Image (cartoon, rainbow, N blue to C red):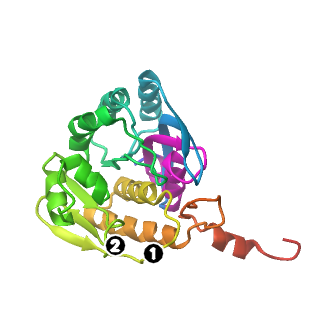
Amino acid sequence: MGRAETAAVLSIAGSDSGGGAGIQADLKAFARCGVHGMTAITAITAQNTVGVTAIEPVSPRMIRAQVAAVAEDIGVDAVKVGMLGTRETIEAVSEALDLLGDAPVVVDPVMVAESGADLLDPGAKSALVEMIVPRATIVTPNIPEARALTGLGEETGQAELAEAVVALGPRAVVVTGGHSDSLVDLFFDGERHIEITGERHPGNSSHGSGCTHSSCLAAFLGRGIEPLEAARAARMMASAAVGNGLESIGAGSGPVDVIGLAEARRMDRGPGL
């Protein structure tokens, strides 16, 4: 743990200028879960609730330098890895993870934005599978991402996908259920298939829900909570964030709200507000 028993958790991910996903969502989730958030930015995106208009990768040297800086001074109790984008970035992140000892690593294999924009180069998927996924404590793909990682077809169910992802080397996987009729997450650690349910909010804004889920999971691991219970708590947080989604933000899919902005506004109302 960091100073005063406050866990320090690092997000290695891309920046979302619209504030709904990426490191912006990660920092909100970290704060909600009671940990100190740190970042190593892998790419800068120009995006909003409608789409992504530009992506500019951060240099591999700068990615490694960001991780080294926080590791040397603050220490890292857990890591969330999000958008990587290119093979060069993946190689840099793999090297940077060597600086973090045995800190648990949550990998959210970001491939496509909520708007449909590609966030992982076509030639980078094999590098992600070979260099990053095997280092994970838990991988958190949705169903399409699990199929992309494993090469399995659309007829493959969550249980088989979970087994195939763990066969790639991580200690455990949560195949999230947002693309299924049941909306049930499936946890698998090589031995147990355990369904994780939560509140359902079909039709609500979900921009940033995957980032929020994986960041909450990393935060709880950083606080010393064992993986299954951390996964359950992360699902609860992510479900509530979708339920509180900020529909009024932007013309597209608004961001999820993990920190309860609407409730804060209600509490602050008073004379003259």
- From the top left corner, tell me how far across and down residue 56 is, in percent: 51, 31
Quadrant hosting residue 103: top left
- From the top left corner, tell me how far across and down residue 37 is, in percent: 50, 48
- From the top left corner, tell me how far across and down residue 251 is, in percent: 64, 59
The amino acid type found where label 1 is placed reads Pro
Q: Earlier in the sequence, mark 2 or mark 1?
A: 2
Residue at 65% across, 61% down: 249
Q: Kindly tell me whether residue 140 is visible in this rendering.
A: no
Residue at 41% across, 55% down: 219
Between 119 and 213, the residue placed more toward the observer is 119
Residue at 34% across, 72% down: 183
Residue farthest top in this picture: 61
Residue 183, label in figure: 2
- Mark 1 and mark 2 in contact (Cβ < 8 Å)? yes
Residue 202, label in figure: 1
Range shown magenta: 3-32
Residue 21 in magenta stretch:
yes
Q: Mark 2 Cα within 10 Å, few/some/many (few <14, many 20+)?
A: some
